[in-house]
Image (cartoon, helix red, strand yellow):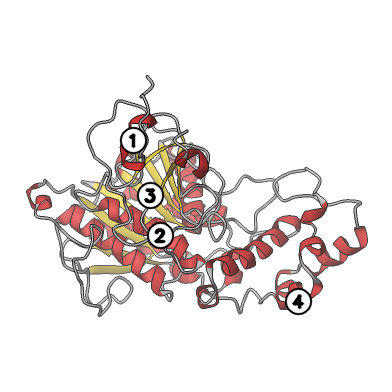
Amino acid sequence: MKLLKTFGLLVLIVSAVSAGHKHGNHGSGNTQVSSNLRPTSWLSVQELQSLPSGEDMNLQQLEDMSVQEGERLIGKIYHLFKINHNMSPSYVPSASNVPVVFVRPNGQSVETNLNELVTKAKQQPNFGNEEVTIFITGLPQTSPAVAKANKKLVQAYMQRYYGQQQPVNANNQDYDSNERQQATSSEEDYSESWKQQKSNRGNLVIIKLGAVLTNFKRYALLDVEQTGQMIGKTLVQLTDEADVPQEIIHLIGQGIGAQVAGAAGRQYKRWTGHQLRRITALDPAKIFASNKNVLSGLARGDADFVDAIHSSTCGMGTRQRVGDVDFYVNGPASAAPGADNVVEAAMRATRYYAESVRPGNERNFAAVPASSKQQYESNEGYGKRAYMGIAAQYDLKGDYVLNVNAKSPFGRSAPAQKQGSYHGLHQAWRSDKRNSQN
């Protein structure tokens, strides 16, 4: 019973068996747990015993499973955590152990650690004079899917900020590889039009939180609030000591890094009285261990604008709304199309966002307000079209649904003309004719 011993869940199983129908609470509140949430109701003793230990479980195991197998395994472990109220977050990485990378205009990188981020920022020419994008990773790049997604995002920002087409930092194996670069899609292909566009200058910083989450135990027991406060304190110092105003800080969190970004945004507001301009969540992850009396993770209000892209709600991601606007790819109950496993599905949100960052692709991902895929595909969505990704408008509110391609280019490349009508005019997804409603 490796998992049970590792996470201290044996008492949960014993109490569940002995208590029968008498008691039990779900992790989200004081509502009494229904019988189908008791571990012994939906997991046999043999299944419980077969669960891997948190220290032994890694991304490779999840990548070797199908999407459905991975979703089921994560679901088992997640529900065990939520039913057992004694599982509190206990892992907070040291700032000196969290790698940080500054990506420079020439594609080279400056590497440091979180505790030296502000010092290094002050040494970078013109740092903070333009937009500062800070990307918090959520998984280690030992996974090819994670490494590729992160590389795509960095390359997209290099093109957006500096008009650079070449792979960034050939010596940095985390963000480049020996694979031949081919222009095969809107994610990777560069049209001549971008050369005529004025670059949106900026600075890109990567906080590699995922690098220290080397096994599932650390991942599941990560103290989101304490880790976020540590990063939030660094952002405050960035404003106070490096003169970087909050209006130009865009925090992007990947997976569990998105939940950490929310805590960082709250810490920044507590210390400064001001909010960060924007937090973007790329497939915000399930929070396994949390203090039952504390609302943890990302929520609207943690920045002036919070947007989220959900690509694996039944796997590593959460279905829970976390932003002012939440985009659900293929609806709130589906894994990203074309993904072979839950890790790849989680990383699709990063791939989608990276595609939107490239100049000319900002409106590749048109979405409409809807609460389900069925409602969306039945043309019963409501409201005006919006764009998922970097071009998301700051006044968006609510849940949006869209379909994407299984392979790059992922966006359906809907017409980019200004939309003044409702869902009935979104002919990119329709074969029927409906009258617009105003």
Left or right: residue 248 compared with residue 163: right
Label 3 neighbour load within 10 Å: few <14, some 14-19, many 20+: many
**What mark, if any, has residue 205 been given in the picture?**
none
The residue that disc 3 covers is 251
Circle nearer the N terminus (4, 3): 4
Q: Quadrant of the N terminus?
A: bottom right
Left or right: residue 310 compared with residue 222: left
Label 4 neighbour load within 10 Å: few <14, some 14-19, many 20+: some
Q: Secondary structure at mark 3?
A: strand
Amino acid tagged 4:
Gln
Which residue is most to the top? 438
Circle nearer the N terminus (2, 1): 2
Label 2 neighbour load within 10 Å: few <14, some 14-19, many 20+: many
Circle nearer the N terminus (4, 2): 4
- Taking 254 as reference, is 307 above or below it? above
* CB under 8 Å between discs 1 and 3: no
Amino acid tagged 1:
His
From the viewer's side, name the closer residue of 360 and 153. Answer: 360
**Location of residue 376 in the rendering, given as x and y in whole percent from the top left corner:** 46, 40
From the viewer's side, name the closer residue of 4 and 250. Answer: 4
What residue is shown at x 53% (from left), y 56% (from top)? 317
Residue 137 in view, yes or no: no
Residue 45 in view, yes or no: yes
The residue that disc 4 covers is 49
**Location of residue 278 in the rendering, given as x and y in whole percent from the top left corner:** 37, 42
From the viewer's side, name the closer residue of 383 and 74. Answer: 383
The residue that disc 1 covers is 426
The residue that disc 2 covers is 348
* CB under 8 Å between discs 4 and 3: no
Circle nearer the N terminus (1, 4): 4
**Location of residue 274 in the rendering, given as x and y in whole percent from the top left corner:** 41, 36
- Taking 26 as reference, is 58 above or below it? below
